[in-house]
């Protein structure tokens, strides 16, 4: 292996390590969204069919008390700045669908990350072999 090939290996490792770091961030974001979706479902179920008091944020750490009626509609963001009003069951169904999509995305991201880490290990092994062959006196 030439020095130029070793530099290419090093560059590939750096690119893959950067890609792996991005996948790690993506994985954390997906897990955060999953937790939020599950918490939303629990909250909707908890307030269904009963009246409860809650605090509504109005800005800068200021809240007002509000009464939530058990038969209240749920306002749900569906993307692109659009929100729709849904009954609680429809909102829960939508969230459960999103959870399934997020779980698929999480599995795909984890698989990609695992494959990337395996490739990085292969490249490290190749680099170690190159270093050992370049310095036969240290074997």
Image (tube, helix red, strand yellow):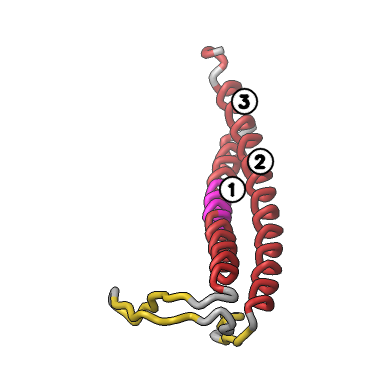
Percent of width and height locating residue 78 = 61, 80
Residue in the picture at 32% in, 78% down? 63
Residue at numbered disc 2:
119
The reply to whether the magenta stretch includes residue 23 is yes
Q: Earlier in the sequence, mark 1 or mark 3?
A: 1
Q: Nearer the viewer, residue 72 or 49?
A: 49
Left/right placement of residue 65 relative to residue 123 reads left
What residue is shown with label 1? 16
Disc 1 crowd rating (10 Å Cα; few below 14, some 14-19, many 20+) is some
> What residue is drawn where x is 58% and y is 37%?
6
Q: Residues within 10 Å of mark 3 (few under 14, many from 20)?
A: few
31 and 22: which is toward the camera: 31
Query: Is 120 rendered above or below residue 63?
Result: above
Seen at 65% across and 55% down, the residue is 106
How far is the residue under mark 1 from the one under mark 2?
8 Å
Image quadrant where residue 125 sits: top right
Q: Are marks 1 and 3 in contact (CB under 8 Å)?
A: no
Residue bearing mark 3:
129
Q: Of marks 2 and 3, which one's residue comes earlier in the chain? A: 2
């Amino acid at each position: 292996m030439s020095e130029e090939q070793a530099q290419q290996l090093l560059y590939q490792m750096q690119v893959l390590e950067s890609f792996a770091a991005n996948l790690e961030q993506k994985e954390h974001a997906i897990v955060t969204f999953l937790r939020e979706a599950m918490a939303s479902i629990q909250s909707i179920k908890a307030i269904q069919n009963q009246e409860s008091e809650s605090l509504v944020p109005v800005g800068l750490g200021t809240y007002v008390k509000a009464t939530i009626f058990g038969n209240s509609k749920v306002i749900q963001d569906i993307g692109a700045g659009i929100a729709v009003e849904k009954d609680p069951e429809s909102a829960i169904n939508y969230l459960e669908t999103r959870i399934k999509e997020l779980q698929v995305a999480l599995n795909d991201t984890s698989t990609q990350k695992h494959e990337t880490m395996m490739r990085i290990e292969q490249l490290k092994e190749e680099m170690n072999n190159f270093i050992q062959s370049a310095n036969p006196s240290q074997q």
